[in-house]
Image: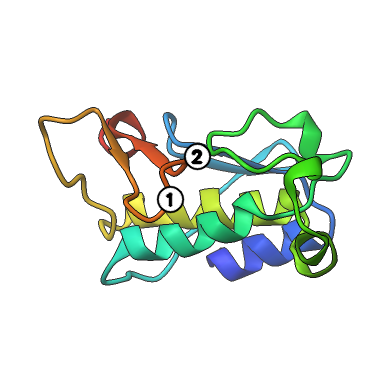
């Protein structure tokens, strides 16, 4: 299925799971195949998705997940974030699903073989581990 269909199912209540290590997507515990379009600058796109995720508002369900990426705690969010932000489970699903799609389709390539992580210059909280990109 295309990534937009995967995310639509998440938005409608399906439980997402993405394993960077195993290169697998799941919905409600069932493995699914997901594909996405190529992008020219996957790192820039990930930074946009991460910014959205970081300022997303938590819910009961979102607190059940161990995040690969760091988000702000509810008390750190602004009123604007709480009113206009996206629910964290959906924001996480978007970030993780697009990330893995871009790894799988070759849009996301590791930048420096000598380093074991990449850190965004725009937001130091955004860190990508080499093992998530290269198996």
Q: Residue furthest right?
A: 60
Secondary-structure class at tag 2: strand
Quadrant in which residue 28 is drawn: top right
Q: Are marks 2 and 1 in contact (CB under 8 Å)?
A: no
Secondary-structure class at tag 1: loop
In the image, 12 versus 52, the foreground residue is 52
Residue position for label 2: 24
Q: Is residue 107 left or right of residue 74?
A: left
Find residue 47 and report its horizontal and vertical position in percent: 43, 58
Of the 4 image quadrants, the one containing the N terminus is bottom right
Q: At 74% from the left edge and 56% from the top edge, which residue is drawn?
A: 10
Find residue 112 and report its horizontal and vertical position in percent: 13, 40
Q: At 77% from the left edge and 62% from the top edge, which residue is drawn?
A: 11
Q: Say few, some or many: other residues with alpha carbon within 10 Å of mark 2 (under 14 / 14 to 19 / 20 or more).
A: some
Vertical position of residue 5 compared to residue 120: above or below: below
Does residue 7 appear anywhere in the picture? yes
Q: Tag 1 or tag 2, which sits nearer the N-term?
A: 2
Residue position for label 1: 123
Of the 4 image quadrants, the one containing the C terminus is top left
Q: Is residue 11 left or right of residue 96?
A: right
In the image, 57 versus 33, the foreground residue is 57
Quadrant in which residue 37 is drawn: bottom left
Q: At 44% from the left edge and 36% from the top edge, which residue is drawn?
A: 20
């Amino acid at each position: 299925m295309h990534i937009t269909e995967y995310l639509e199912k998440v938005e409608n209540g399906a439980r997402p799971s993405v394993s960077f290590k195993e290169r697998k997507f799941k919905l409600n515990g069932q493995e699914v195949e997901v594909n996405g379009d190529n992008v020219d600058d996957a790192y820039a796109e990930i930074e946009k998705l991460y910014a959205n995720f970081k300022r997303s508002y938590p819910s009961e369900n979102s607190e059940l997940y161990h995040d690969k990426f760091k988000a702000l705690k509810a008390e750190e969010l602004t009123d604007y974030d709480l009113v206009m932000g996206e629910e964290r489970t959906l924001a996480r699903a978007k970030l993780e699903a697009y990330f893995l799609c871009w790894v799988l389709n070759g849009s996301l390539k590791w930048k420096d073989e000598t380093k074991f992580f990449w850190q965004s210059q725009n937001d130091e909280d955004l860190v990508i581990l080499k093992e998530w990109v290269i198996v």
